[in-house]
Image (tube, rainbow, N blue to C red):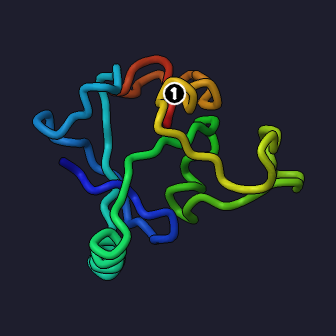
Amino acid sequence: SSTPMKLCNNPSGLSFLPKPELNEIIDCKHQFMIDRKPKFEQEFNEAKSKYGSIIAYHGSPTYNWHAIIDNNLQNYSNTKQMTSGALFGSGIYLTSAISLSRSFSKMNKTWNKSKLGTSLSVV
């Protein structure tokens, strides 16, 4: 299976997840993985060996994902950029329940020639 993304790395791009690696819990046709630079892959694997890892989901509107991929998750609590409340205090919210993260990921229309379909939600 694919290695989860470390929150503090600087990914270099996206690629489709090969069919044998698709997460069956996620009910969607398209799943991607973040292609990390080798330096960050090594850092992640060292931290994973030392501390372990879990799969966690983050729901955010589709228009935020380009910035998230380029700049990683950022804590915008109590700033103009904050798009959701801070019910449990300042921070970046993750969950093991994809259904919960989907509630923060609004369905948006795609480019009319998109191979991903006519609408898109990202977690």
**What residue type is disc 1 on?**
Ser
Taking the image as shown, residue 90 lies to the left or right of residue 116, namely right
Residue at x-position 45% and y-position 71%? 9
Residue at x-position 45% and y-position 45%? 56
Identify whether 42 is placed above or below 103.
Answer: below
Percent coordinates x, y for residue 69 in the rendering: 50, 57
Taking the image as shown, residue 9 lies to the left or right of residue 94, namely left
Residue at x-position 27% and y-position 56%? 3
Percent coordinates x, y for residue 22 in the rendering: 21, 34
Taking the image as shown, residue 75 lies to the left or right of residue 16, namely right
Assign a secondary structure to mark 1.
loop
Q: Nearer the viewer, residue 117 or 83?
A: 83
Identify whether 65 is placed above or below 39.
Answer: above
Percent coordinates x, y for residue 58 in the rendering: 55, 42
Q: Quadrant location of residue 34? A: bottom left
Identify whether 113 is placed above or below 67.
Answer: above
Percent coordinates x, y for residue 98 in the rendering: 47, 30
| Residue furthest front as drawn | 51
Q: Residues within 10 Å of mark 1 (few under 14, many from 20)?
A: some
Q: Quadrant location of residue 11? A: bottom left
Count of numbered tags: 1
Q: Quadrant location of residue 38? A: bottom left
Taking the image as shown, residue 103 lies to the left or right of residue 123, namely right
Identify whether 99 is placed above or below 60.
Answer: above
Q: Which residue is mark 1?
A: 121
